Amino acid sequence: MKRHIKTYDDLLAEEQRLTTLLNTQKELISIDIAGVKQGLKPVGKMFQFMHNVSTRDNVSPVMNFGLEMGIDVLVRKFLLARAGWLTKIVIPFFIKNYSSHIIGEEKREALLKRVSGFFRKITPKSRRRIERNIPPDLSAA
């Protein structure tokens, strides 16, 4: 439907109508895009899971080594003790890859602090004094 514009006021009214129509269309498009993003979240999570299962996170290789050793002992020796050789190779591979992604950077730092605190507790006092350059207590002799 074409509107015939005859006066300047008609032009301003048409401009106002088209501006509001444009704004409502923009809002509808943004709502539709948000709906599409929300609908695609499960697909994105699935791809992220597949990425985590197929690749290994090498941020802290020492921690990954310990994690891999624990998984090898637990999964291969106990859980899959009676499984076939292919199962003993494939399943631990996927578990190691996924578990390397589970531990985030903050959790890694907290875990490393706990491990270092544990090792500090179990080391002998004389060894700790040598590490800190503290002379031995001579009054005990």
Image: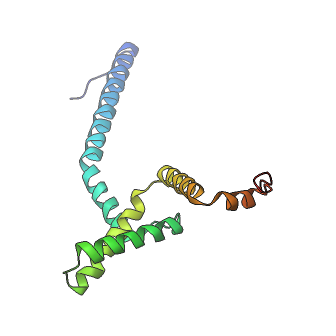
Query: For the N terminus, which image quadrant?
Result: top left
Task: Tell me: residue 26, above or below residue 67.
Answer: above
Q: Nearer the viewer, residue 54 or 85?
A: 85
Seen in the image, is 90 located left or right of residue 119?
left
Q: Position of residue 17 (x, y in %)?
A: 32, 22
Most extreme residue toward the front is 141
Number of numbered discs visible in the structure rendering: 0
Q: Nearer the viewer, residue 77 or 10?
A: 77
Instruction: Name the colour scheme.
Output: rainbow
Query: Which residue is depicted at the point 34% across and 59% down?
Result: 48
Task: Tell me: residue 57, above or below residue 33.
Answer: below
Q: Nearer the viewer, residue 61 or 51?
A: 61
Query: Which residue is depicted at the point 50% across and 67% down?
Result: 58
Task: Tell me: residue 16, above or below residue 90.
Answer: above
Displayed quadrant of residue 134: bottom right
Query: Which residue is depicted at the point 31% across and 70% down?
Result: 74
Query: Which residue is depicted at the point 20% across and 85% down?
Result: 84
Q: Position of residue 3 (x, y in %)?
A: 26, 24
Q: Position of residue 33 (x, y in %)?
A: 30, 42
Most extreme residue toward the bottom is 85
Displayed quadrant of residue 68: bottom left
Query: For the C terminus, which image quadrant?
Result: bottom right
Q: Nearer the viewer, residue 56 or 74?
A: 74
